[in-house]
Image (tube, rainbow, N blue to C red):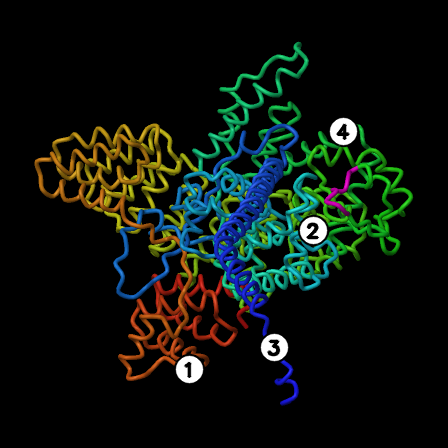
């Protein structure tokens, strides 16, 4: 070491040059560093902007693809785009979620009178019960289960809302910033085997629907949007899925929510099967039926589009249809038809091939029209439908799967050459070769016509279970095959087939299905079979036992009104001539609840002969009977009924006057002028009552009258009523569903625990405290507990809920029954 140091020398010139070079380099770097930083920042910003622009462009293209898909998602797509004929979908307003201590808004007479009927929407629609838009139902951040029977318009509701989101419709607010992903569960899970990657499954599905120039960045767009909570998944088809696919769909949704908890969801489901969905935090809501004004608008709009788009392409020698006459004829007896059935009825009327006024005739006309000239293919198509239903399927599996790549969608032509794998030999399946020969060239036509649809991996399916069921009923089958179908779990395919199969010769297998109703407190079996009555011949041996079972429900005053109203709806829709006679007899019953049911049944059936008898009930009516009579008269809506309502407005007691005013508001053409005239009358009781009607008239002129009464009326009681009505119009809609807090964060339950010297601990202690509130709480606390149990109750809770139903008449009984009904729909059935 000393030797090394002794030989070390420092050249002063080299040191000076190195030092100067270093200082110079540092000075240059100091000058260049801000430039480098700016350049790097600009490069990164440009890169991010380029990616953002690419992502934005991808989103624009994806939105366009979604809009294009949505506009074709209805049965009449070969004729019109969805926007040309769609009626804005509405949802039945669910009961208000009770929060003890909150101020509830004053309810309208329909909400006070008609119970919540998610599985029987026709009766609330006739009475124009309160409804919500899809945007309103989603506005509080909930994810939705969209419940509805086959043909009720769930697919159209999803497609219509997707179109609104694509266009960023101002009426839907911030939801327009979401990316709508509109898919069918059969496309999402074509194999029935979910691999565990929800993003991959979703990307593959939307890729098959997207345009070619949008494929490259689609996965990145979905990844970013899901991570940011900007995806609105509109999932169709779970309502028509057999059990295996339904279970697979629930597994997919659970995984999606776990990985991307910010995803918004609307899932179509059957009101008889929402199992697995409420446990994911989804809130059940029911699609509304069409009221009379909506039906009239649809009929007129269809005729208008037909005249402008279809007639010019027809033979000039064909005499044009008088649209006014057609509107009157079609609107005369269509109140009990589903939106799908009304669509087919209107279509057959304008096409000139109507076979009758009923739903079965409308469906038959459609099938004959679409399969005209395809007699051999029609037979095989019927066998195909029967095969799917008897094998618990909604699409046709091929012998060899043909996966799609590069986003290329399967084509109808490729399917016509496919060899479907029918398993086993039976009377309805004659072999693959016959299917190929019979259907060769027909599949593309049926797909273009909208009867069939090509799902992912070249799977063939019917667009509507109703259509599949009607075709399957015409196929050759044996009694043993029907027996096997009867043993299937409940699902849309089975229901659609049996609805079309219940003729006099086919009810032997159903002989015992109505036995032991005490084992079915929800009367699911009776009510499900009651839906078939419209399709059964008048002499069918099935009708009498079902009608008797329904009639017996009406006479049990301890049964919930919600159950008995379902029975009324089923009786009226059966079309049996003796139903109205029974309802007239019940008007004389000593029981007020039976009278109320009879009144609403007569209004639902629009029995004009009942108007005098109903009008006489207004003289000394209780508030409940008075509301029901006014609703029934408005539903009947003829001259005598309107005159009775006008008389009640002028001469009855205060409560009846107000009910009459609200009822007149439901008859826009004739009722509104009466309300406007009443607002100028000398009688202050009339002016005050009129306010109750004007608040439900959705017209600017009605608001102007209310504002004038609030400021200028000479009586303070009228001014006060008008002011309160205007405040009511501005108040939030309490029927909008919202997510329930955890029990440990529930203010009312914490208050209940404090009243009893307890705390609220997570897990079982909180559950036990909730049950204690159901047993010993106030009426409001019991209602709040039932709200929670409706979504998260277990088999253990049902006996306690049934005790409430049996022992607490009125609102608690109805809430308890509604809770048990929802638990039953979720697969938690009463013992």
Spatial distance from mark 4 to mark 2, Cα to Cα?
36 Å
Of the image marks 3 and 1, the number of the one nearer the N terminus: 3
10 Å crowding of disc 3: few (<14), some (14-19), many (20+) = few
Residue 507 visible (yes or no): yes
Circle 2 or circle 1, nearest the eye: 2
> Cβ–Cβ below 8 Å for labels 2 and 1?
no
Q: Is residue 614 magenta?
A: no
Q: Main secondary structure of the magenta part?
A: loop
Determine whether, in the image, residue 102 is placed left or right of residue 817: left
Q: Quadrant of the C terminus?
A: bottom right
Q: Give the residue drawn at x 64%, y 23%.
A: 352
Residue that label 3 marks? 9
Residue that label 1 marks? 765
Spatial distance from mark 4 to mark 3, Cα to Cα?
109 Å
In terms of image quadrants, where is residue 800? bottom left
Spatial distance from mark 4 to mark 1, Cα to Cα?
66 Å
Of the image marks 4 and 3, the number of the one nearer the N terminus: 3
Circle 3 or circle 1, nearest the eye: 3
Spatial distance from mark 3 to mark 1, Cα to Cα?
86 Å
Q: Nearer the viewer, residue 289 or 408?
A: 408
Circle 4 or circle 3, nearest the eye: 3
Of the image marks 4 and 1, the number of the one nearer the N terminus: 4
Of the image marks 4 and 2, the number of the one nearer the N terminus: 2
Q: Pick out the residue farthest to the bottom.
A: 2
Q: Give the residue drawn at x 25%, y 46%.
A: 728
Residue that label 4 marks? 372
Q: Residues in magenta?
A: 405-412
Spatial distance from mark 2 to mark 1, Cα to Cα?
45 Å
Residue that label 2 marks? 204
Circle 4 or circle 1, nearest the eye: 1
Circle 4 or circle 2, nearest the eye: 2
Of the image marks 2 and 1, the number of the one nearer the N terminus: 2
């Amino acid at each position: 070491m000393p030797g090394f140091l002794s030989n070390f020398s420092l050249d002063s010139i080299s040191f000076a040059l190195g030092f100067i070079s270093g200082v110079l380099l540092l000075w240059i770097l100091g000058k260049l560093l801000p430039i480098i930083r700016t350049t790097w920042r600009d490069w990164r910003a440009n890169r991010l902007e380029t990616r953002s622009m690419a992502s934005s462009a991808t989103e624009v293209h994806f939105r366009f693809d979604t809009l294009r898909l949505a506009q074709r998602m209805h049965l009449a797509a070969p004729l019109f785009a969805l926007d040309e004929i769609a009626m804005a979908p509405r949802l039945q307003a669910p009961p208000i979620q009770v929060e003890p201590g909150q101020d509830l808004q004053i309810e309208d007479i329909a909400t006070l009178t008609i119970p919540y009927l998610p599985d029987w929407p026709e009766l609330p629609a006739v009475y124009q019960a309160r409804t919500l838009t899809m945007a309103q139902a989603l506005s509080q951040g909930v994810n939705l289960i969209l419940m509805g029977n086959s043909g009720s318009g769930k697919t159209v509701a999803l497609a219509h809302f997707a179109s609104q989101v694509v266009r960023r419709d101002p009426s839907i607010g911030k939801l327009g910033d979401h990316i709508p992903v509109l898919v069918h569960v059969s496309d999402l899970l074509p194999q029935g085997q979910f691999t565990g990657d929800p993003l991959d499954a979703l990307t593959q599905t939307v890729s098959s629907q997207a345009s070619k120039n949008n494929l490259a960045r689609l996965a990145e767009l979905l990844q970013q949007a899901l991570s940011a909570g900007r995806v609105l998944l509109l999932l169709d088809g779970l309502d028509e899925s057999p059990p295996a696919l339904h279970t697979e769909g629930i597994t997919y949704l659970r995984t999606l929510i776990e990985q991307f908890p910010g995803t918004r969801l609307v899932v179509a489901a059957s009101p008889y099967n929402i199992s697995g969905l409420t446990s994911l935090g989804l809130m059940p809501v029911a699609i509304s039926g069409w009221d009379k004004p909506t039906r009239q608008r649809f009929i007129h709009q269809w005729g208008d589009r037909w005249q402008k788009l279809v007639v010019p392409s027809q033979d000039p020698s064909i005499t044009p249809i008088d649209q006014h006459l057609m509107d009157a004829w079609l609107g005369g007896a269509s109140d009990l038809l589903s939106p799908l059935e009304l669509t087919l009825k209107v279509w057959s009327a304008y096409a000139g091939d109507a076979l009758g006024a009923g739903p079965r005739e409308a469906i038959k006309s459609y099938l004959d029209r679409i399969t005209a000239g395809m007699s051999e293919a029609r037979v095989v198509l019927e066998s195909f439908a029967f095969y799917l239903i008897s094998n618990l399927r909604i699409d046709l599996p091929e012998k060899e799967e043909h996966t799609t790549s590069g986003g290329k969608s399967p084509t109808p032509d490729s399917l016509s050459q496919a060899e479907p794998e029918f398993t086993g030999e039976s009377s309805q399946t004659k072999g693959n070769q016959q299917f190929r020969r019979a259907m060769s060239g027909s599949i593309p036509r049926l797909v273009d016509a909208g009867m069939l649809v090509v799902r992912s991996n070249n799977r063939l399916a019917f667009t509507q279970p109703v259509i599949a069921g009607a075709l399957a009923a015409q196929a050759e089958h044996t009694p043993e095959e029907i027996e096997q179908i009867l043993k299937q779990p409940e699902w849309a395919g089975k229901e659609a087939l049996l609805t079309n199969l219940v003729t006099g010769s086919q009810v032997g297998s159903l002989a015992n299905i109505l036995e032991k109703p005490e084992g079915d407190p929800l009367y699911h079996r009776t009510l499900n079979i009651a839906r078939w009555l419209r399709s059964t011949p008048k002499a069918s041996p099935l009708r009498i036992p079902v009608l008797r079972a329904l009639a017996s429900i009406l006479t049990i005053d301890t049964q919930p009104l919600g159950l008995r109203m379902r029975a009324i709806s089923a009786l009226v829709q059966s079309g049996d001539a003796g139903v109205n006679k029974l309802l007239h007899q019940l008007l004389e019953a000593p029981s007020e609840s039976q009278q109320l049911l009879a009144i609403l049944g007569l209004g639902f059936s629009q029995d004009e002969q009942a108007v005098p008898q109903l009008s006489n009930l207004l003289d000394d009516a209780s508030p409940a009977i008075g509301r029901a009579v006014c609703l029934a008269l408005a539903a009947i809506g003829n001259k005598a009924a309107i005159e009775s309502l006008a008389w009640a407005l002028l001469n009855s007691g205060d409560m009846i006057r107000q009910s009459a005013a609200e009822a007149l508001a439901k008859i826009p053409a004739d009722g509104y002028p009466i309300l406007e005239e009443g607002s100028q009358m000398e009688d202050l009781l009339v002016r005050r009552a009129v306010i109750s009607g004007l608040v439900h008239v959705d017209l600017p002129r009605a608001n102007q009258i209310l504002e004038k009464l609030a400021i200028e009326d000479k009586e303070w009681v009228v001014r006060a009523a008008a002011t309160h009505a205007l405040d009511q119009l501005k108040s939030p809609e309490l029927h909008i569903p919202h997510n329930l807090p955890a029990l440990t964060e529930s203010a009312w339950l914490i208050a209940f625990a404090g009243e009893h010297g307890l705390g609220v601990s997570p897990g079982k202690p909180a559950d036990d405290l909730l049950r204690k509130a159901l047993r010993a709480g106030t009426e409001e606390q019991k209602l709040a507990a039932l709200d929670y149990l409706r979504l998260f109750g277990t088999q253990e809770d049902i006996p306690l809920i049934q005790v409430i139903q049996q022992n607490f008449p009125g609102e608690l009984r109805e809430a308890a029954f509604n809770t048990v009904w929802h638990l039953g729909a979720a697969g938690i059935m009463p013992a």
